[in-house]
Amino acid sequence: MHYGVETLRSIEAVQALCRDCLSPNAVQSGRCTACGSPRVLAHPDLGRLHIAHLDCDAFYASVEKRDRPELRDVPVIVGGAKRGVVTTCCYIARQYGVRSAMPMFKALKACSDAVVIKPDFAKYKAASRAIFGKVRALTPLVQTLSLDEAWIDLSGTERLNGGPPAFQLVRLQQEIEREVGLTVSVGLAANRFLAKIASDLDKPRGFAVIGQDEAAAFLANRPVSILPGVGPVFARTLGSDGYRTVGDLAAAEIKTLAARYGEHGLRLHALAHARDNRPVDPDSERKAMSCETTFDADLTGLADLENVLWPLCDRLASQARREGVAGRVLTLKLRKSDFRILTRRRTLAEPTQTARIIFAQAREMLAREIGPAYRLIGVGIADLVEPSDVATDLFGSSEARALKAEKAIDALRDKFGKAAVTSGRSVIPLPKGEGGARAPRGRVRGFGD
């Protein structure tokens, strides 16, 4: 179905759309007058909004249920063995209180009838390619966040795709469900921040809209933790400073927030007023991944910071191996007690996806920055490449030797649980400089001082 020429001339007049038969503006008493469906989108800005966030519903578990129809009405958990953790779970399991990252023994105690399935990332990648291939057929402006979610900018595509963005997205949902066998939820809004919030409002198989005019009122009573970049520790800091809701931040003077939280305060002020000028940038997709943590109390000593850095490196490397990527560039992120962010980066001689190499290089950069008190540390890899680009000479490559050992650990953890194998700096000494980095001359290049 395509919109007619006359309709396209007045796209902004589209304020309602049936999610089943795609009829525009055919609604009365909450139902479509053309087909009788109650699944009707209605919003005064429906024809004007063009930024969307698409999120696959319980993605890994849904792929497993698609491929094993007998599991349709059964609680499904995707993750490690009994001593492992939950990677994700279906909506039935969530009704029992099961959540991602929950220890498996707790999940099975809450939902003893659940079927536990080991992750199959090759299968999930194939499903992701099928879904986002359809998205990219509508527009090249697609910025993926992971295998199962992305931002989409559909501005200027009305004539090419036969209807306004809302129409295209509803039709896309139908095609994905029909041809890929999976469901997705969509948020449509005026910017990326609001679109991502909207996509969580009507899960699963949902579609929600947040207009710019209503956004500030919508956000006002929400907790500050809804804002990107506000984790549990920072939320407690904001709360102790008197900012518990987004409305509290919106009412604050921008100078006050900037003085207290630096550049992050400026960002908080903008988000609290529902402003987000970030474009949908397809060039940024899958170019970096990172892990970070905020401390309950500031840290200054190298040993204390290294103790926090190692598990982050272990988690980051494990994620890289699961997603089948390796990084050519290593980044270290530190946030000082005054909220100023300091970032260091180093280009490696060969791409890495191992904790051993990441930690060896990150701690060298960390040692140069000891002195100030820090409230956050993070580590990341960028300039991602396929693992086929990683050296495979077991005798001539530090990365290859470390990779062989860490893949063996992955296999053991998958079988016996994450806690079954301990791999740390106390077990494997890491000589300074291992990892094949191009040694920087003088000071490592820095960003964000």
Image (spheres, rainbow, N blue to C red):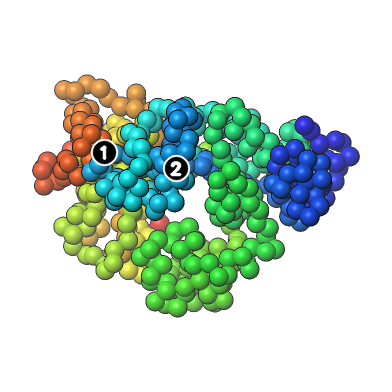
Q: What residue is shown with label 2?
A: 90
Is disc 2 placed on a helix, strand or loop?
loop
Q: How far apart are marks 1 and 2 (CA)?
A: 17 Å
Please, is residue 351 above or below residue 239 in the view? above
Amino acid type indicated by mark 1: Ala
Report the residue at 19% width, 23% height from top: 394
Which x, y percent locates residue 53?
A: 58, 46
Q: Give, as a three-letter code, the residue at label 2.
A: Cys
Residue position for label 1: 81
Left or right relative to 425: residue 158: right
Judge by depth and name the residue closer to the eye, 73 or 379.
73
Image coordinates for residue 260, horizontal then vertical, percent: 43, 74
x and y, in percent, of residue 305 in the image: 22, 58
Residue at position x 18%, y 59% from top? 304
- Along the viewing direction, whichever of 127 and 365 lies nearer the viewer: 127
Quadrant for the N terminus in the image:
top right
